[in-house]
Image (cartoon, rainbow, N blue to C red):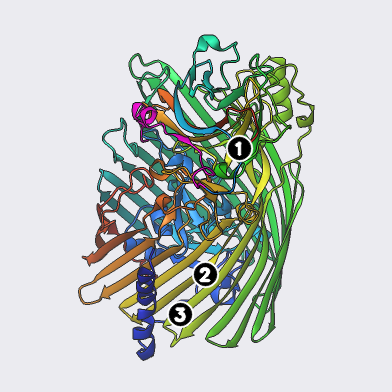
Amino acid sequence: MKITNLKLTLLSAAIVVTGMMSCGKDDNPVPTPAPSITVTDSMKIGYSDNHYAFYSFKDSSRVNLSDSASTKWDFGVRFVSIIVNSHASGPGNAGVITENSIFNNYTTAPADGYGYDTSSTNLAIDNSFSTGWYNYDNATHVLSPKAGKFFVIKTADGHYAKMEILAVDYANFNPPNPTPDSLVYKFRYTYQSDGSRNF
Amino acid sequence: MGKKSLHIILFLFFFPTVIFAQKHGRDSVPKVLDEVIVTATRTENKVSNIPLPVEVISAKNIQRSGSQKLLDILQMQTGLVVANNPLGTSLQGYPNPFGEGVQMQGLDPAYTLILVDGEPLVGRNAGILNLGRIAIGNIKQIEIIKGPATCLYGSDALAGVINIITESSSENPVRFQTHYATNNTLGLTGAVSILHNKTSVELFANRYSSDGYDLDKNIYGKTIDPFRDYSGNVKVKFQLNEKSDLTISARYFSETQFNNYLIYPQDHPEVVKGTTRETDGSVFIKYNHKLNSKVSYYASVYSTYYHNNAAVFLEKNDSFYERIELTDFLLRPEIQVSIGKNPSSLFTTGAGYNIEKLNSTRYNSVNKLNSGYVFVQKQLLVNSKTNIIAGARYDKNSLYPAQLSPKIAMAYKPAPNFILKGSVGAGFKAPDFRQQFLNFSNSLIGYTILGAKELAHGLQRMQNAGEIAPSVDIKPYLHPNDLDPEKSIGVNLGFDYTLHDNTVFKLNVFRNDISNLIESYNLPFNKTNNQSIYSYKNLNRVFTEGLEASLTNNFNANFSIFAGYQFLIAKDKDVINDIKEGKLYKRDPVTYQTSLVSLSEYKGLYNRSRHNANLRFQYNNVSHRASAFITAKYRGDYGYSGLNGFQNGSGVYDDDRETVKGFVLLNTTLSKKIWKDWEVQGGIENILNYKNKTLMPNIYGRTFFINLIFKPKKIKQQ
């Protein structure tokens, strides 16, 4: 198992402003593109942590565990479980839809249809073995996010984002010891700060 | 695999035909044998009368190879590939509990029925039967039927049947053999054959042991642990009178494996030591009676058991750590009646009853499966050119819906040396005990697996114990559908072409459509520890199709050659559907670009080689009483999920970075007769020293062996 160098990953976390429409300076007045940002980031999580690790799209950063009861975070990860900030999981107004298509081509979040966590064991995002968001290989222990699967998230404070997990790497994994020290979740997301549903 | 290498293979394949087939029609050239087999029809039949793809491995070829392992002998056959259980490949120093089996027509080892003298062995582990349980020193011949044979043998005979026929009246009254090979591997075989009045007795004993080996010094523990096998066999046949005989046979096998590896109880390495002991035994009684020239019948009772007991202890204080135990028992009375004459018109019918019991540390209680079956078969020579075999079998039991498995096969001989063969048959594989009765909770991670029959009971128990939240509605899962058997339709079409009696070319095209494959799935709610609950249901549909060709040529009395080739495509139909509907994506592991998987990118099921080929040369030198035997097996490129950590999120084999390169196993054996009744053999296995420590832990690398055989011929009575 190749171990991702976390520092390097964080340093190279590319912040790209999607200026698809703004590159060409046409005569035709084009509506100013929505100020959405696409970010690739990663979080390192202890394999046997019994708490979630939280992340904020707006700040592009991890949120302290002490703020778990606040609306500062948008999603949380623990092993293969992912929570969003509302109902059973947090005080916010978040919701999530699991989408199957190509991340880059997905341009508008739906107005409704968002699910939420109804209890700590009944999460909106399917975390199970065969139907969930990842493939797990019993023999090689490779945990691989299913391609084409990403999450359309209404954030704690009512903004819209789309988020895709790109890779889950094991850090400090020394077979035959079956448990790695930690997991590195690599993900990308597009966050629309103007409150619209367009990415 | 490139086009070039395919051309080379095709050339190698047809080259002998061109050179040898033309010129040698002399009388001295031995004919290619038309063996008599029993597996295809449950009655004695010449291979040329059987409209099915059939292969026979003779005792001679087993002896010529000098090999002591059934798996090595089987994998030198066309279209048979050694397949590891995917769980058994990267256990990193752990004893591999699954072992290797034989893939036939692209189907996993679980789909081939393994018989010894027509009766099944029990004790499959994750579908794989440890073929090391079968000693090879008293094999008379191995009969291989490809394509579904469920119409005669019931469950598991979906890809085909391998029937190991043991010696019944050997021409050698005494045989003794010692085998010594790399890794301090020692084999001792002794056999005695007695014919007194009208009673024949066959005695056989074998001891086989090895120090095992270690392919990866960085991992604690050996790749293959040291082991010691004992097996014994007694077969007595009483000729009661001219019309009836009684056979009683018993076999016993035991293997002790000495395990030593690391475990990680609290993330902290601990050395454990222990033994894995496998024992297996059976008793078989059969009464044959010929009522008159047309009607004969037999009645038999077969009983077998298998026991596996693995116990390990912590090395530091010798304290008990873990024990896994499994016991499997089968009792089967059976009768079979044959009316008519073979091959002109023969009707065969039979019925039997299986009582099977299984007990394991992973099951709640002793599990029982009782099933009855009845089968009919008609062999008919329609005219001098056409013969037909039609049959069907009905299996009924308490655990899954009754199954009717018909099959029809036909042969047509437009010329005496040309036979066209075709067959269509249905096959099924019953849900195994694990899929029905497993009740297992992983202590490390905390997930639970429940077999289909355990689901309701298990869920209720877990909810009562607070392992499932009281708010979860488990009602919809309290009456799960019965698991259906996995089903298949197999079609085989081909021909045998004989040239000058000494050359036979065979071709067979096959297709198997399998539905209802049983897969694990997870319930839509979790345990209170947030871990999943899994059970089993019928899900996938796959197909395998391909072509098999072989050429046998007896160049002259002292030189013969055999060449075989299999082309195989095996794919998941549901994956193909997903691709067609644009629902399957992949993600570039470097750029993270997502795109649709195309049909042309999908290469098929993992662990299947598109190309397999094998060659066998045999040379006798009469004046020196010596012979040479060379075999080679090419296993082509195949896919392996997550090879080198590769992942693109599609979950299917669609990228060359998951391709394991093909390889060749080359063996050679030289034999020389010395004095009157002795023979010395020396050989090298895996001459090219192929190794792959993670994917092929069963292959050691280059191995040397030497055999000493004592085999006096029977003294002719005057």
Q: Nearer the viewer, mark 3 or mark 2?
A: 2
Name the kind of residue labelled 1 in the image: Ser
Sequence-earlier tag: 3 or 2: 3
Q: Specify few, some or many for label 2: CA neighbours under 10 Å numbering under 14, 14-19, or 20 or more.
A: many
Q: CA distance from mark 2 to mark 1?
A: 34 Å
Name the side, left or right, on which A97 lies relative to B396. Answer: left
Q: Residues within 10 Å of mark 3 (few under 14, many from 20)?
A: many
Q: Which residue is mark 1?
A: A130
Is mark 3 in CB contact (under 8 Å) with mark 2? no
Is disc 2 placed on a helix, strand or loop? Answer: strand
The x and y percentages for residue B664 are: 33, 60
Residue A145 relative to residue B633: left or right = right
Q: Chain of mark 1?
A: A
Amino acid type assigned to the residue bearing label 2 in the image:
Leu
Callout 3: chain: B
Q: Please give the chain letter of the residue carrying mark 2.
A: B
Query: Which residue was labeled with disc 2?
Result: B547
- The nearer-to-camera label among 1 and 3 is 1
Dominant secondary structure (helix, strand or loop) of the stretch shown in magenta: loop
Quarter of the image where one finds residue B508? bottom right
As for residue B182 lying within the magenta part, the answer is: no
> In this picture, is B28 found above or below B624?
below
- Give whichever of B681, B616 is nearer the camera: B616
- The amino acid marked with disc number 3 is Val
Nearest the viewer among B528 and A29 is A29
The CA span between labels 1 and 3 is 49 Å
Point out the stretch of residues depicted in magenta.
A1-25
Q: Position of residue B341 (x, y in %)?
A: 68, 75
Contact between labelled residues 3 and 1, with CB atoms less than 8 Å apart: no
Q: Is residue B574 visible?
A: yes
